[in-house]
Every structure is written in C-alpha cells, then in structure tokens.
Image (cartoon, grey):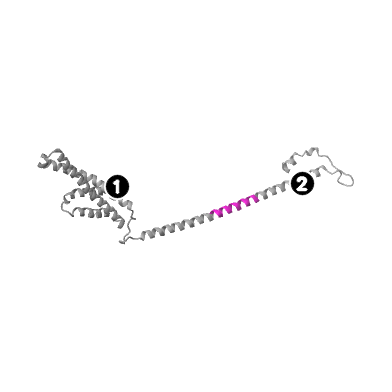
Amino acid sequence: MSSWDRSRTIPWSRAIPVAPATASGDMEDVDLLKERIWRDLSWEAAQEEKERKEQQKLAAAVAADQNGESASSTLANTTDAQHIMQQSSSSITSTTTDSDVEKNILGFVGRPYLTSDLLKNAAFGATIGSITGMCFGFMDSIRSASSSTVLKSASRSAQGKFVFQGTYRSGMFFGAFFGVFHTAKYATRVLVDPGDAGEICAGSVAALGGVMAKREWRVSMPYAVMLVAMDTFHVFMREDGKA
C-alpha cells in the first residue's frame, strides 16, 4: 500500500491531542498535526514516484544498451557474411572465367570429354541403327525374294535363309553407320561445340562419306540419308519442346 492510500485510510475524525508540545502544557492543535502528517505523506509519495521513475529510466537505459549491442553484433555478422559472399562470388567468377578461356588442342572451347558419354552415344547410334537397318534389310530381302525367279523356285528354307542373311547384314551395316554418325557428333561437340546443326553436319560428312567410299555400299545411301533426317527431325523437335 502506498503512502497516498494509507493517508486516505487514516481516521482523521478520531484524532486526539497527544503530549503537550510546549513547556506551558498547551495541547498541540489537531489541524497542525493533520497538516504535518499530510505533508509527510505527500513527501513520501513524491519520493516513491521519483524512485519509480528512476528505476524505469535505468531499465530503459539497460534495454537500450542490450539492443545496441545486439544490433552492432548483427551488423558485424551481416558485414562478415557479405564479405564472405563477395569473396565466394569473386572466386567463382574467376574460376568460371578461367574455365571459359581454357581451350583444347585445336584452339576451340568445347565440352568436357567423358568416356562414358562417348560410349553412350556410340551404343545409342549402334542400337537404333541396327534395329532400323534390320527393318530395311527385311523389307529389301522380301522384295528381292518375291521378284527373283530363282528364289521363287527355291525351297522355303532357302528363301528364309536369304531373308535372314539380308536382315542381319543390313542391321550390322546400319548399326555401324549410325554408331559412327553419333560418335562423330560427340567428337565435334567435345572439340568445337558448334551446336546441334554443326554436329549434325559433321556427323553426316563422316558417316555418309564412309558410305560413299565403296561402290557396293552406295545402294544403301537413301536409307542412310533417311536415318540422318530422322535424327535431325528428333533433335530440332526436342528443342522446340514437341518431342
């Protein structure tokens, strides 16, 4: 209970004179006592209010100091983080610049070479070429067997053997052709990296040039060109997001 509350609960109406305040024995006035008590209570209330305000100011100052320290530490941490990020970005930029200017033995900036990628491209070309070539060889063998008078008079087993031989020979031929085509594309990508169009042109020159090297292989040129056209169509449709 504060001094002000205590002063309100004092029974002033029952205040009685106390010991004489003078040598003559006169009784001290009740109004004077009341005023003295009121003054004392007012002073105590003022002191309590002053102490409360000082405590509030002290608490506010301590809180401000703590906030200032935390803000300064946060600012320091942020500055350090920004400095580290700047160093990292500068190192990454320098590394990227160094890797960008690095050239291969031909003086071009190509793609990094991986043996696994080379084998994947060669295997893909050989697989697709073999399957497509077997289809081409089967159709040609059936057409030759039906149009040849010698094969018409031959037995079923002889006709089947002829068709089988034409199918697997064509499969092996076009498997090798398309494997060389994709291997040449990958080599061009690693050495020069001219883009899809440049890779297709380089692969076509290497693979179709090999087909043109021998007279007996030239009859397969239409099928070879068809394979290259199918691969080109697939590549450019994939870039457009339609395949």
Q: Quadrant of the N terminus?
A: top right
Which residue is found at the position 43% from the left and 58% from the top? 91
Q: Which residues are magenta?
A: 57-74
Label 1: element kind: helix
The quarter of the picture where residue 109 lies is bottom left
Q: Position of residue 177 (x, y in %)?
A: 23, 50
Q: Which amino acid lies under the numbered mark 1 shown in the image of this protein?
A: Arg
Residue 195 visible in the displayed image: no
- Crowdedness of circle 2 by 10 Å Cα count: few (<14), some, many (20+)? some
- Return the residue nearer the eye: 129 or 14: 129
How many numbered markers are drawn? 2
Which residue is found at the position 51% from the left and 56% from the top? 80
Q: Position of residue 23 (x, y in %)?
A: 89, 47
Q: Which amino acid lies under the numbered mark 2 shown in the image of this protein?
A: Asp
Residue 166 vertical position relative to residue 75 in the rendered view, above or below:
above
The circle on residue 40 is 2
Q: Position of residue 149 (x, y in %)?
A: 9, 41
Q: Earlier in the sequence, mark 1 or mark 2?
A: 2
Dominant secondary-structure state across the stretch colored magenta: helix
Which residue is found at the position 38% from the left and 60% from the top? 98
Q: Which residue is mark 1?
A: 238
Residue 4 vertical position relative to residue 190 in the rendered view, above or below:
above
